[in-house]
Amino acid sequence: MEIPRHWRLKQQRYSLVGETCPHCEAKIFPPRDVCPTCGGEAKTQYTFSGKGEVFSYTTIYEAPSGYDETAPYTVALVKLEEGPIITAQLTDLGDQPVEIGMPVEMVTRKLRSENEDRGILIYGYKFRPVLSRAA
Amino acid sequence: MPENTLLKPVKPVGIVGYGAYVPRYRIPAKEIARIWTGGKDSVPIKEKAVPGLDEDVATMSIEAARNALLRAPVNPQEIRAVWVGSESHPYAVKPTSTIVAEAIGAAPNVQAGDWEFACKAGTEAMVAAIGLVGSGMAHYAMAIGMDTAQGRPGDALEYTAGAGGAAYLLGPAEESLAVINATFSYVTDTPDFWRRPEQKYPQHGLRFTGEPAYFKHITEAGKTLMEASGTTAKDYRYAVFHQPNTKFPQRVAGILGFTKEQIAPGLLVPVIGNTYAGAAVIGLTAILDIAEPGDRILMVSFGSGAGSDAFDILVTEAIKERQGRAPKTQDYIARRTEIDYGTYVRFRDKLAK
Ligand SMILES: [Zn+2]
């Protein structure tokens, strides 16, 4: 992917900015300006909470070029609490096993580095197990 | 003492929100000693935090800044500066701060810049942010101290060079959870520690690291701040100092008249390592997490090269309601996965390729 495309996508990638439908209030990600639920025009920006759960997952051992530095890694379908299901890498798993229904939260991480050590760094959303907090 | 000894803004300024970040992985110092000395060396800390493969100062700053914003009821578009102090910025040319500003929704009407002053880059950014807010130029300014420090394999620094830091949203005192009464800085040209361009690991001037550097600058800054403020160590509930290892901050606290109890909550180096530009400022987050209204806190940073910034901080009533809005520093410390030296070498990109 070339630099202009990374640059255009930065808001939705860094902070999960999508859209909300003014007609039926569906939350839309990735943004596409048309509501997939009611077909109406939907251009109102909406920043997702970043909370969701693992819908399904798979572990990648043979990573595509550019992603091999972090292989093996786990890719999941994450069901956001606002409704949409998106594909994203899981991170910060440590020795924690992944389970369907596991609560996760969005973090912004380094996705990859272009052209080894000379190109731009691509940042974007991943999901990690929800940080547990003392009461 | 001259009248303008202390740095005080025209309009009172304080901390509106604060947030910490520590990566998940830990390598025990004993595991490093196992590789290099067969485990015979006494070690300067228990363990240090290690960033994951997809983490750097930009991603870590984003999470700390988001935590600061969770505690501050502020529209990010009202933030007029995002300043990141670090000695491990991911790019040599291209600011970390633009990435952070974009990710937290503060772009585009914002000052963005990366600050460098070894381990005091973060507090340097805080002092500047106080000036920007206190002059009326900005309503809010974000200052961050964050590092993913590296030590040459086998070097003494490898035991302690950790990862973590904190973000502070500075704003008007009346909106703050802690007011910054004044700051004072003490800076000289001292060759205690440096890294030349394109060198991966730093060098240290062994004879210079202790007395003429760390101890001299912290005691001068702390002592002068207290003298000019008419305070002594007894007036403070807590104190936090730059912490390259466990012993230095304990000793400098004693020199300035502070007890072990006063520094205990902010002394994080034994469990996360020396987080360089993040060290003093993340110690302060752990204190703010447990502070009560009316508590007074002294923070003194230290950066090699060399200098110290001292802060006189007074906690307000607003603290109680904001402490729980974001993860506490101890929550991050408790999230812990131990790694061995082999995994550490991979995570920290120490393999020759
Ligand atoms: Zn709709």
Image: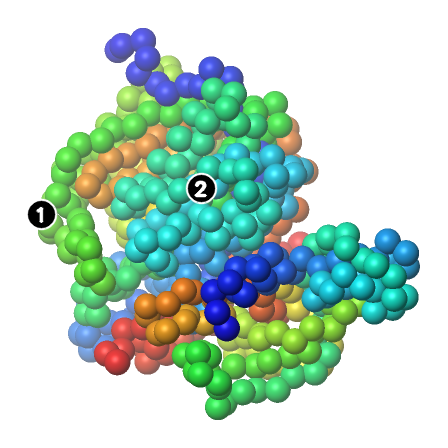
The Cα–Cα distance between marks 2 and 1, rounded to whole angstroms, is: 37 Å
Label ID, residue B309: none
**Which residue type carries mark 1?**
Arg
Work out whether mark 2 precedes mark 1 in sequence or the reverse, and give the earlier one.
Answer: 2
Tag 1's secondary structure?
Answer: helix
> Residue B220 appears at what percent x and percent y?
24, 28
Q: Can residue B330 be seen?
A: no
Instruction: Please name whichever residue, B27 or B38, is drawn nearer the observer in this view of the structure.
Output: B27
Crowd tier of the residue under label 2, counting other residues whose Cα lies within 10 Å: few below 14, some 14–19, many 20 or above:
many
What residue is drawn where x is 59% and y is 62%? A9
Instruction: Please name whichever residue, B35 or B187, is drawn nearer the observer in this view of the structure.
Output: B187
> Residue B238 appears at what percent x and percent y?
44, 35
Contact between marks 2 and 1 (CB within 8 A): the answer is: no
Q: Mark 1 points at which residue?
A: B207
Q: State which quadrant residue B322 falls in.
A: top right
Q: Mark 2 points at which residue?
A: B112
Which colour scheme appears in the figure?
A: rainbow
